[in-house]
């Protein structure tokens, strides 16, 4: 009946409107934060995915979730690779 | 007519209910898994985003998708940086 | 009235259809891109989460958002760890 098709049409329109505004597609976005010394921290809301260190050093660990700590005895710079979803 | 507005109202209510329960916002979350020796693996469901090695070593590769392998000749520890969406 | 329940039923059906096709759950996926020399780049659409270098070198930086640059004076290979959401 016409009532039926009216309701169907309205629902389809409403859903079509929804599809035009889907939840935005998330993407990864990363930045490097470089600091002098042996520590470098990511901005709030970002996570550390890796660290780079001066003096060719590849020994590092993460302190307090978001801070890179380069372990070699002498260290002039530390870089944190920081990512989040946007 | 009143039929029209009734349907409109009901659809709006149904969609408002949906918007109160959107698909949960995903975030990145990471942990470090440190192991003695030259291999360290991420837990199931996580990906490796980087590795750290003992002896200041920065030469590593990924084996079998989720395992960090530190390449320097002598190696005492290996850390995998492991991330996933939560 | 019966009009009311007809509309309710139709809306519920339409939403049930939606729930069967929710926005697909995103996951992180990563690959390593290894290149000779001191530069290695991620494919389009991926981000760099970390780098590895030959000669045990752990000093690297990111050039132009998606390229790993290993800094040690002598360098034979560079690997970029590249991730995206799938």
Image (cartoon, coloured by chain):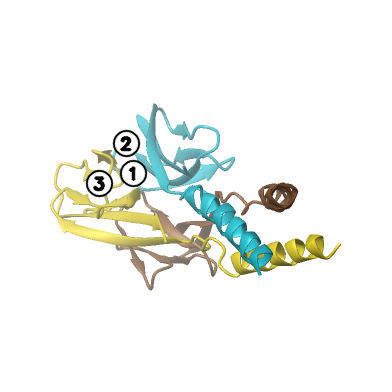
Chain colours: A cyan, B brown, C yellow
Q: Residues within 10 Å of mark 1 (few under 14, many from 20)?
A: many
Chain to which the residue tagged by mark 3 belongs: C
Whether residue B61 is visible to the viewer of this picture, yes or no, is: yes
Asked whether disc 2 touches disc 1, contact meaning CB atoms under 8 Å apart, the reply is: yes
Q: Is residue B25 above or below residue A33?
A: below
**In the drawing, does residue C9 fall left or right of residue B66?**
right
Could you say whether the residue bearing mark 1 is in a helix, strand or loop? loop
**In the drawing, does residue B65 fall left or right of residue C18?**
left
Residue extending furthest toward the bottom: B64
The residue carrying mark 2 is: A54
Residue extending furthest toward the top: A36
The location of residue A6, given as percent across then percent down, is 63, 60
Q: Residue at x 53, y 39 (%)?
A: A66
Q: Residue at x 83, y 65 (%)?
A: C2
Could you say whether the residue bearing mark 2 is in a helix, strand or loop? loop
Do the residues at pointers 2 and 1 share their chain?
Answer: yes
The residue carrying mark 3 is: C68
Q: Which mark is residue B86?
A: none
Q: Which quadrant of the rendered structure holds the N terminus of chain C?
A: bottom right
Asked whether disc 3 touches disc 2, contact meaning CB atoms under 8 Å apart, the reply is: no
Measured in 3D between alpha carbons, the distance from the residue under mark 3 to the one under mark 2, in whole angstroms, is 15 Å
**In the drawing, does residue C59 fall left or right of residue A81?**
left
Measured in 3D between alpha carbons, the distance from the residue under mark 2 to the one under mark 1, in whole angstroms, is 6 Å
Could you say whether the residue bearing mark 3 is in a helix, strand or loop? strand
Tell which of B41 and B47 is nearer to you.
Answer: B47
Asked whether disc 3 touches disc 1, contact meaning CB atoms under 8 Å apart, the reply is: no
């Amino acid at each position: 009946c016409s009532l039926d098709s009216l309701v169907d049409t309205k629902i389809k329109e409403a859903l079509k409107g929804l599809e035009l505004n889907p939840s935005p597609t998330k993407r990864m976005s990363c930045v490097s934060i470089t600091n002098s010394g042996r520590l470098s921290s990511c901005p709030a809301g970002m996570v550390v995915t890796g660290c780079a260190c001066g003096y060719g050093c590849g020994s590092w660990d993460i302190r307090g979730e978001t801070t890179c700590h380069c372990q070699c005895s002498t260290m002039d710079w530390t870089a944190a690779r920081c990512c989040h979803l946007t």
